[in-house]
């Protein structure tokens, strides 16, 4: 079973393509995480966990989802991580999760896709994003091939900075950088409520037809990038920047 979390669609695209190539079933972690429901899933085929990179790790909320979830049947776990550049030494904590859960770690496969983190960087324009997704497809195919053959993904060659980035920098990122304060809505808001529905942490509610943010945010970018009229800003960091949404997977 392919199980995924995705905020702006890259990991969903990847998961859909993997499930398609493997003839496997697909489960979205969104509602389990949002509604605080412990998953009780069973699969005879290997588990394939797909998610983005947040500061050179899989998102903590997805790691917790796997750690605390019930995944019975197959004891094999593959991890596919989408990223805007690279995922550093994200594999270390994934191996640790497998050890905790008595699962056989079958490797981490990196797929470079458009960067959605517009609080810090710029997302590519639509045409460039489409080109990047086309370039990612053979990488996803190659990942599916390893799984189909029952082989582990090859180990990633590490650079000396990777452990630092996925370790200390990741800790600092969650402690000092991820802040819920800073979101605001502009006059163009049409009150559709999509932002509130798209928040995996249920951190947005509507008040008098406008979104209001609470204090729990993981900066996934679903609200900012998913607003149909681009009415959400984060301080002045997102102003004038392209909003990113992965186009739908069409086979
Ligand atoms: C909070 C946050 C942190 C990110 N950190 C990294 C990173 O460390 N390395 C990287 O290559 N991409 C990073 N990205 C980019 C995303 O991992 C990438 O765009 C991913 O494919 C988005 O997946 P999604 O569309 O499924 O949400 C980050 C994005 C966000 C929102
Ligand atoms: S998604 Fe955009 S338009 Fe819709 S309620 Fe949220 S801010 Fe307003
Ligand atoms: S409030 Fe934070 S966690 Fe919720 S959708 Fe927006 S960026 Fe993601």
Image (spheres, rainbow, N blue to C red):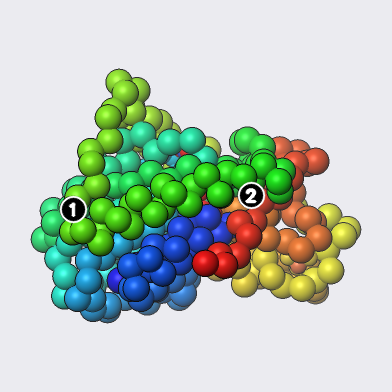
Q: Label 1: how many residues lie within 10 Å, few (<14), some (14-19) or many (20+)? A: few
Q: Residue 133, how many percent across, how many down?
A: 56, 49
| Sequence order check, earlier mark of 2 and 1 | 2
Query: Is residue 180 in sight in this rendering?
Result: no
Query: Is residue 239 in sight in this rendering?
Result: yes
At x 35%, y 50%, the residue is 142
> Residue at the right extreme?
187
At x 39%, y 54%, the residue is 141
Residue 160 lies in what quarter of the image?
A: top left
At x 19%, y 76%, the residue is 44
Q: Residue 228, how many percent across, how many down?
A: 76, 63
Q: Residue 106, how many percent across, how many down?
A: 20, 52
Pointer 2: what residue?
Answer: 130
The local secondary structure at tag 2 comes to: helix
Nearer to us in this view, 29 or 84: 84
Q: Label 2: how many residues lie within 10 Å, few (<14), some (14-19) or many (20+)? A: some
Query: Ligand 1 near label 1 (Cβ, under 8 Å)?
Result: no
Q: CA distance from mark 2 to mark 1?
A: 30 Å
The local secondary structure at tag 1 comes to: loop
Pointer 1: what residue?
Answer: 151
User: Does residue 229 lie above or below 29 as drawn?
Assistant: above
């Amino acid at each position: 079973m392919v199980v995924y979390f995705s905020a702006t669609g890259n990991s969903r695209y990847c998961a859909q393509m993997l499930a398609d190539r493997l003839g496997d079933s697909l489960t979205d972690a969104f509602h389990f995480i949002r509604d605080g429901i412990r998953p009780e899933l069973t699969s005879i085929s290997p588990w394939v966990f797909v998610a983005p990179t947040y500061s050179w790790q899989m998102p903590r909320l997805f790691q917790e989802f796997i750690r605390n979830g019930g995944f019975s049947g197959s004891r094999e776990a593959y991890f596919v991580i989408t990223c805007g550049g690279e995922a550093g030494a994200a594999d270390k904590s994934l191996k640790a999760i497998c050890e905790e859960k008595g699962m056989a770690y079958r490797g981490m496969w990196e797929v470079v896709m458009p960067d959605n983190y517009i609080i810090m960087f710029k997302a590519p324009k639509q045409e460039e994003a489409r080109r990047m997704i086309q370039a990612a497809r053979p990488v996803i195919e190659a990942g599916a091939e390893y799984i189909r053959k029952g082989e582990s993904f090859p180990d990633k060659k590490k650079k000396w900075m990777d452990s630092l980035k996925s370790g200390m920098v990741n800790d600092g990122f969650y402690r000092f950088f991820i802040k819920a304060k800073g979101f605001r809505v502009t006059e163009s808001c049409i009150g559709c409520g999509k932002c509130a529905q798209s928040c995996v942490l249920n951190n947005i509610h509507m008040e008098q037809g406008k979104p209001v943010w609470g204090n729990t945010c993981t900066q996934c970018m679903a609200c900012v990038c998913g607003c149909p009229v681009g009415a959400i800003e984060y301080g002045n960091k997102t102003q004038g920047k392209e909003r990113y949404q992965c186009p739908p997977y069409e086979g």
